[in-house]
Amino acid sequence: MSERDARELDRLRAARDLLVERGLLVQKELAGISPSIERSWRRSVSVHASNTPAPPRFIDSIDARNPLVVAAGPVLDRWQDSLSDMRVAVFLSDRSGQIVARRLTDRGDGRRLDRAFATEGFDFSESALGTNGLGTPMEDRAPVFVRGPEHFNDSLESLACAGAPILDPRTGRVVGSIAFAATLKASNPLMLAMAREAAQQVEARLVEMNAPIDLAATAAFLRSRSSKDPVLVLSAETVIADVRALAVMSPDTHALLWDKLQKLEWKEPSNVVELPASSKTAEVRRLGGGSVFALELHGRDDDEHAPQDVAARQPVGRAADAAELEAASRVSGIVALAGPPGAGKHYSARDWLTSRADGEEPLTLDAAAAPTAGMAGMAELATQAIQAGRSVVVRHIDVLDLPGFRTLEPTLRLVADAARRGSGTREGTPDTRPRIVLTFDDESLGEQVRSRIVALAPISTIPALRRMRDIIPGLVRTIIDEWPEDDRVAVPPAVMQALVGWDWPGNVSELRTTLELLIAQRGGRVLRVDDLPEHLRRQTRSLSTIEALEYDAIVDALRRAGGNRSAAAAALGIGRTTLYRKMHAYGLDREDKPSVAR
């Protein structure tokens, strides 16, 4: 500690002790003291709060079912995980000032805090302990940062504590407080912003827990404002809509819409979004800190879509549309299908070719399984299948060099010649000519091979699944329908929300593998949120402002570093261990995430 800091602490201590000794008439001697701290000191003196290190009152009447404790639990857990490198403890108090929960990021801190009686069950109200980071915010109804001797009681002088009140969203009454505490040396000015953010998160959770009551009141209010437009109000788990709004709502629509709402930027009081699978738009207002949204719907009421699952309006869950593939292949008989790993290129190609050949599956050949020297045999198999009228899929073309691809070209020309002659087709009859589909990872394809493909066939691209969230419900139901009827499971809205919200770095392949594992391990006929892997369960909540910024920064650093974690950690200014922990917290350490290297 610098000499200047020591002098400042001595000045604070002297001012506080003078006020205790001489009473509330002391004035000029308190110049330079924070107004909030001075107000709290005066209140502490007026109620004869103790300033000696004697133990505070031990209440010990914690009710684990208290809505405040239930709402704050996940918030405290997330902050504990995020702050492990800062050695900052998190406290929650109820309205009486009793500490009802504590989270530690360092075991040694627990012993130090226990000596100050800063643990569950003790009374940290301002009337009992004087100025402190839990009791004072409730009295001031405002965030407060209390450092060292600004604490009224000597036992807390070694600490710095930033706290904020928690207000009941319905009544505006103070129901408790949340605070971050560290040693005076380890304190950080950001702790006050963290306390504000944490209090807002708990308040948002309280809104969600009371959502049905709040939603009903809000819906009635909006109906009175906008009688001509359909209205709906929704949270993560609840929807209240008038009769006209029901026409565009379904469990799948709710999941897709909720995902859109979570990603909105709020620079104005309202936003406009397009409703999934509908011609309508909605003007959106945010309620309850972003946990509840009110939507006024605009557009024609005669939508062609009935209120049904979005999956029923998807092209049988395919990642690529069959009509587009048919049109692309009409001239050359060949389609080149590009996309990231796991995007469903092979599944889409096989599904389309099977549907157009009355159920006959195409021959699938994998270029990755045949080196250049073995391509002649693969080309011969492809030629035989084409001559027999059977379509062919050749996967992983991107692994071939130019000589390997040239080995396949005679077969491709065979199909192209048949397409040009128009054999086997008459006006009004189905086109049953065999097709060839080449699939590859666009980023891995060599330039020489690419130029040869472009000369032979149009290239269709399947985007990453995170860019096609609207098809996820359809894909989910298609994959589930492939299972025997007795093994199929229902997917409730909360689970669909989690599936829609995940980025799916492994694309359709990851989605399929995840669903197959969930179905195999399910405990009943309905999937539950608790059945989901941890990284998907996190999708059932929205990230805080700080978490979202941190998530984006980590993803960007990993991308710029080419997946090298050491380089990404250095760019972020954090340790490699810290980066690993944060990646795990955000589900960024998955084995199947291609952008992250071990």
Image: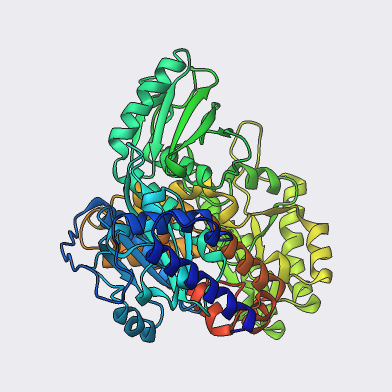
Q: In which quarter of the image is residue 343?
A: bottom right
Query: Who's the residue at 64% across and 77% down the image?
Result: 563
Location of residue 36 with respect to 187 vertically, above or below: above
Q: In this view, does 103 lie above or below 317?
A: below
Q: Position of residue 72 (x, y in %)?
A: 33, 58
Q: Considering the image in quadrants, where does the N terminus appear?
A: bottom right
Q: In which quarter of the image is residue 45?
A: bottom left
In the displayed structure, would residue 375 be above or below residue 325? below
Residue 132 visible somewhere in the drawing: no
Q: Is residue 453 left or right of residue 187?
A: right
Instruction: Identify which residue is drawn at 44% across, 78% down.
Output: 158
Q: Report the residue at 47% width, 73% height from top.
A: 148
Apparent side of residue 239 relative to residue 393 in the rendered image (left or right) = left
Quadrant location of residue 113? bottom left
Point out the residue furthest to the left here. 61
For the point 42% across and 68% down, the residue is 151
Q: Quadrant of the image for the C terminus?
A: bottom right
User: What is the count of numbered marks?
Assistant: 0
**Is 133 positioned to the left or the right of 488 in the image?**
right
Q: Is residue 267 left or right of residue 171?
A: right
Q: Position of residue 2 (x, y in %)?
A: 62, 83
How far across and how far down the image is residue 312, in percent? 42, 38
Of residue 313 and residue 434, the one placed in the foreground of this image is 313
**Depth order, front residue of 425/326:** 326
Image spot of residue 395 (x, y percent): 62, 68
Residue 336 in view here: yes
Tell which of 179 and 226 is nearer to you. 179
Could you say which is closer to the camera, residue 322 or residue 17? Answer: 17
